[in-house]
Amino acid sequence: MNVAGEPSFRDSVDLMFKRAAALMDMSPGLQEKIRVCNSTYTVRFGVRLRGEIKTFTGYRSVHSEHMEPVKGGIRYALSVNQDEVEALAALMTYKCALVETPFGGSKGGLCIDPRAWDAQEMELITRRFAYELIKRDLINPAQNVPAPDMGTGEREMAWIADQYARMNTTDINAKACVTGKPPHAGGIQGRVEATGRGVQYALREFFRHPEDALKAGLTGGLEGKRVVVQGLGNVGYHAAKFLYEEDGARVIAVIERDGVLLDDKGLDIEDIRNWMTKNNGLLAGYPRATFSPDGAAALELDCDLLIPAALEGVIHLGNAARIKAPLIIEAANGPITFGADEILRQRGAVIIPDMYANAGGVTVSYFEWVKNLSHIRFGRMQRRAEEARSRLLVEELERLSADQGLGWQLTPNFKQKFLQGDGELELVRSGLDDTMRAAYNAMREVWHGRQDVQDLRVAAYIVSISRIAAAYQSKGL
Ligand code: NAD
């Protein structure tokens, strides 16, 4: 996706870092220490498949160990390379600091087309990759905890967890070696939806501040806003579905690998996802919207909100000037290059930056890791006690009402909601919502509070760099 004259993904992240760091009172030495990637391990390993030995190349980068374990997803794609993994690891460092998850930043990747191999073959490959990382402590509950990213999901995380447990049979915390596992294998409710849910919570918080929305020329809330989404994978699907089903946003275009579906009246996200599942991940042929094979052009549609949720570098020097959306939320990592960011900001677009926008994933991963270490499901101890206390209150109110002849009636819907204690999913969503609100307000304080800060990305970097600097300083560096 690189356009001539454009820096690489890692250089783009570095330039964004430097733009913010230049506004901070920090020694050049400490800036350099925070910016650089500490280490990258490259592994090449063979797996016997289809009668011959196939060699695969994988990476695990550790960007910053100011807090441990370090955290970051594992990506499966043919385009994976060291530059990309290091850029993503750096973003993890900044993201974790911004949303106050107590981790350093890391990322992994395997050069593979996951659609080219069946489930059994994928398991062999994943276990072998995991073995290489585990034996070097690049997967370890106390040191380095991966999660899903593009091309991986619950299935791969379950295999990795099992591989770790086989190699560390007496580690009582083995399950905490990786997050994003299925609930039956030590996962947590709400992790699959978490990144998309975080995008929704981020947008809700943004629209809670009318003066912020006005900076993008927008008024009101999410209701009726015209949305373009790129990528209907884990992140894009959940974000689009929640915005459409719960907030009344109108998704007018969905862009995928093979093109775009368009409908100005609004698309049914669940219906499209079902179609894709049955049609090899393709949009073409979907009967209830207009299809065009030119997906990239749809990024330039007239809309209120653009959600790039597929991959990096899709808004670049070549198309930035034609992007019309006044508000862009970076659900993917690095979808806007450094040069494109400059063009969009000059035009007055508001960009909700990746390190904040897609932090829902790592936030709920943090909850999962804590759950694994505490060996108990959230809500197990208090749910019924909460219900009993609420019931006491409701019964007392009803008794008073009857005694005094007041005729008060609680609506059945209210009563049922009020009486229900919170289970794991409700607690996870509450923790995520709280995190997204707090992080937005930390960014916002800098955005509005400093004359020299014009945008949310610089504000996000300033918040997170100052927290990382404080962590290094307290270590005596
Ligand atoms: P995914 O593999 O589930 O989905 C990616 C989707 O993008 C797929 O449907 C794919 O077909 C589509 N796609 C690929 N190339 C495309 C193109 N050129 N145009 C349009 N669509 C294209 O991946 P994901 O987990 O949803 O991750 C998406 C982005 O979000 C990545 O940048 C990832 O780093 C970031 N992210 C993911 C998580 C997570 O929890 N999964 C967390 C934080 C950030």
Image (cartoon, helix red, strand yellow):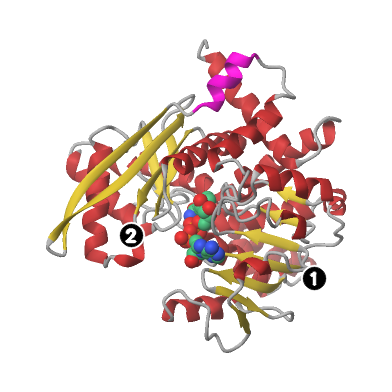
What is the quadrant of residue 460 in the picture? top right
Image height check: is 27 above or below 240? above
Residue 453 showing in the rendered view: yes
Within 8 Å of ligand 1, the CB of disc 2?
no
- Magenta: main secondary structure equals helix
- The residue furthest top is 476
Q: Are marks 2 and 1 in contact (CB under 8 Å)?
A: no
Image height check: is 401 above or below 45? below
Residue 339: x and y in percent read: 69, 44
Taking depth in this image into account, of 366 and 146 the one nearest to the observer is 146
Taking depth in this image into account, of 130 and 169 the one nearest to the observer is 130
Q: Residue at x 52, y 12 (%)?
A: 477
Amino acid under label 1? Answer: Gly
Residue 476: x and y in percent read: 52, 10
Residue 282: x and y in percent read: 48, 76
State which mark lies toward you, 2 or 1.
Answer: 2
Label 2 packing within 10 angstroms: few (<14), some (14-19), many (20+): some
For the magenta stretch, what is the residue range? 27-36
Q: Residue at x 24, y 58 (%)?
A: 123
| Residue 445 shown left or right of residue 49 in the figure | right
Label 2 – label 1 distance at C-alpha: 59 Å
Residue 94: x and y in percent read: 58, 35
Residue 224, disc: none
Residue 385 showing in the rendered view: no
Residue 155, disc: 2
Q: Does the magenta stretch include residue 246?
A: no
Label 1 packing within 10 angstroms: few (<14), some (14-19), many (20+): few
Q: Which residue is drawn at 63% across and 85% down?
A: 289
Image height check: is 456 above or below 473? below
Residue 405, disc: 1
